[in-house]
Amino acid sequence: MDAPRSPIEEKEFEGPSVDSADLQERIAARRLRIKARVEAAKREAAEDDSKKKKSLDSSKEQTVSRKQVEQSRLRLAKLISDGSELVSNVKIAADSRTMTHVNEEDNKIRAKREKLEAEAKSASERFEEINGMWEVALAKKIPQELNIMLEEQRSACDAMVEEKDKLISEFQQELKVKDDLYIKDLRKQAEDIDLMITRMEEQIKNLTKAYGEELLQIEKSFVAERGDIMNAHTKNWEQLMTQRRDKEVEYMKAREKRVEDYEQQLQHLRVEDAEEYNMVKIKLETDVQVLEQQLQAMRATYQLNQEKLEYNFQV
């Protein structure tokens, strides 16, 4: 059973109707409905894709691998949509045949009902007429006339039975036709099922092949992107290593220059310290000599004072 349509879908499906008595018009209406639904799904998918693309573009530029993934997704979505439409066409044709068969059966049942009602009415009238003739036959006194009346009654009854048998034969023939039609429908359904299975198997093969091809393309795009990234990082690494070597050379040169400066400063300090040391040494040696002279003088004075004290003590 088809799902209820929205007002937009009702507006889109103005034209061929699925409830029409014309088979081609119903098929066209169902095809238009499927086409409209597929287009609506594609529009929704396109809107979602545009939103995703905007979000990706706002964050960073789309890479080669992402482009390949998007192209593969669109191709696979189209293959799935086309395959679903191929399988759905078989179902649409089967539904159309079923609807046609149902309409024909409704018309036949209606015609049979009318025919049975007409035959029942006619049979009832004939039966009443035959019953009415029995009273006339009973009123006959002459055997020949009674025999004629009985023959007429028999002929009327035989005609009535013959019509019933004819109607029964028609119904039996119609039942046989229905049995044949049922067998044909079963065969047609089996053919439709085989066709659907064949199309589904082809769709599976095509999708499997397409998925493999797209997976290979995606893998190639990732490998190519990986190679580009590796090359870019290698170049960046080489540049950094070159900068590092240049900085190391500059650092070594600066260090050598600093070492030379430090050596010159140390040599200058050594010279200055040596001169200062010599001056201090000379000064200290001079001071030592002066102090030794003072010590000798004090010793002489001490000796003289001691002799004076001893002399005074003896005197």
Image (tube, rainbow, N blue to C red):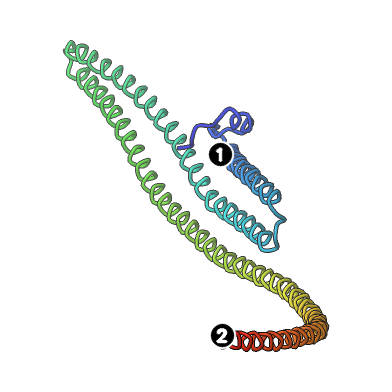
Q: Is residue 68 above or below residue 43?
A: below
**Looking at the picture, which amino acid does disc 1 mark?**
Leu
For label 1, count other residues whose C-alpha is less than 10 Å away and answer few (under 14), some (14-19) or many (20+): some
State the residue at coordinates (18%, 10%). 139
Q: Is residue 257 left or right of residue 180?
A: right
**Looking at the picture, which amino acid does disc 2 mark?**
Phe
- Percent x, y of residue 288: 73, 86
- Of the numbered discs 2 and 1, the one sitting upstream in the chain is 1
Q: Is residue 163 above or below residue 41?
A: above
Q: CA distance from mark 2 to mark 1?
A: 170 Å
- Percent x, y of residue 184: 42, 51
Q: Is residue 260 above or below residue 142?
A: below
Which quadrant would residue 112 be assigned to in this image?
Answer: top left
- Percent x, y of residue 246: 80, 78
Per the image, the residue denoted by label 1 is: 23
For residue 65, say whether it is visible.
yes
Label 2 sits on a secondary structure element that is helix
State the residue at coordinates (70%, 89%). 296
State the residue at coordinates (57%, 68%). 212
Q: Is residue 172 above or below residue 250?
A: above
For label 2, count other residues whose C-alpha is less than 10 Å away and answer few (under 14), some (14-19) or many (20+): few
For residue 256, say whether it is visible.
no
State the residue at coordinates (59%, 67%). 215
Q: Which mark is residue 313?
A: 2
Which quadrant would residue 76 be assigned to in this image?
Answer: bottom right
Foreground residue, 200 or 97? 200
User: Is the N terminus in the top left, top right, bottom left or bottom right quadrant?
Assistant: top left
User: Is the C terminus in the top left, top right, bottom left or bottom right quadrant?
Assistant: bottom right
